[in-house]
Amino acid sequence: MTSFRDYVTGRRGRAVAGGILVADGIVGIDGQVGRKRAGILSSLVVLVVGLVFVGVGVYVHHQHQPYANGMSTTGTVTGVQTSRNDHGQPAYAPIIAFTAASGRRVTVTEPNTSSVRPTVGGSVQLSYRKGDPQSARVIPAHDWVAFAVTGIGGLTALIGAITFVIRLKTLLAGLRLLIGSRGQHGGR
């Protein structure tokens, strides 16, 4: 007669444990009350979302850099264009005037809006392509938004990668138990 201990530690016990570990590795299994553990698929989604945020942060930071081989100058905020965002809140874009290298006076409107109204008369750093002063873009003194998005994305990607490795180890351990239990005979 097979004892309970032999049943749990034998082939059937390893098969059950292996199956549970495989399921936990793939989709995650509820742990403590109200807590859901991510499976390998969820961790891949978290990893991809984090990498997308890193990409967006790098792109935004690149857009806030001077043009390669471009011209740099200081502009003056001469007005403010007001619009409404998707939530009906006011959004402001500075209207900036500057003198191009050719001596021509140029006025551009910043394409990005903000909830903070710009100060008319304030100075901003600009960069534009040679021969195309209408391409001017504002070069912020601090690029906190891009750094924050990149940092949050990097942290999210790291969490996704670590969770992926843990779930992969769980999945492989479950497969080893399942495969090992099939190769044994005699109930143990």
Image: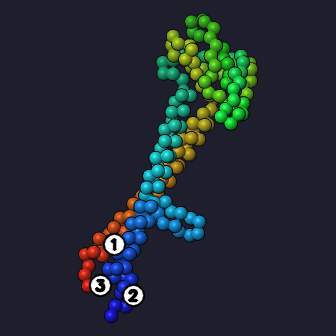
**Residue at left offset 30%, top offset 76%:** 181
Please give left or right for residue 125 compared with residue 181 in the image.
right
Q: Is residue 65 above or below residue 101?
A: below
Tag count: 3
Badge 1 amino acid: Leu
Give the camera-side residue of 177 and 120.
177
Q: Is residue 122 above or below residue 51?
A: above
Badge 3 amino acid: Gly
- Reading the chain from its start, which is encountered first: label 3 or label 1? 1
Circle 3 sits in a helix, a strand or a loop, which is it?
loop
Q: Counting other residues with Cα less than 10 Å from the Cα at mark 1, is it few (<14), some (14-19), or many (20 or more)?
A: many
- Marks 3 and 1 close (CB-CB < 8 Å): no
Foreground: disc 3 or disc 2: 3
Distance (Cα) linking label 3 and label 2:
12 Å
Circle 2 sits in a helix, a strand or a loop, which is it?
helix
Which residue matches tag 3?
187
Which residue matches tag 1?
177
Badge 2 amino acid: Arg
**Residue at left offset 71%, top offset 24%:** 82
- Marks 2 and 1 close (CB-CB < 8 Å): no
Quarter of the image with the C terminus is: bottom left
Please give left or right for residue 3 compared with residue 28 in the image.
left
Q: Which mark is residue 5?
A: 2
- Marks 3 and 2 close (CB-CB < 8 Å): no
Q: Counting other residues with Cα less than 10 Å from the Cα at mark 2, is it few (<14), some (14-19), or many (20 or more)?
A: few
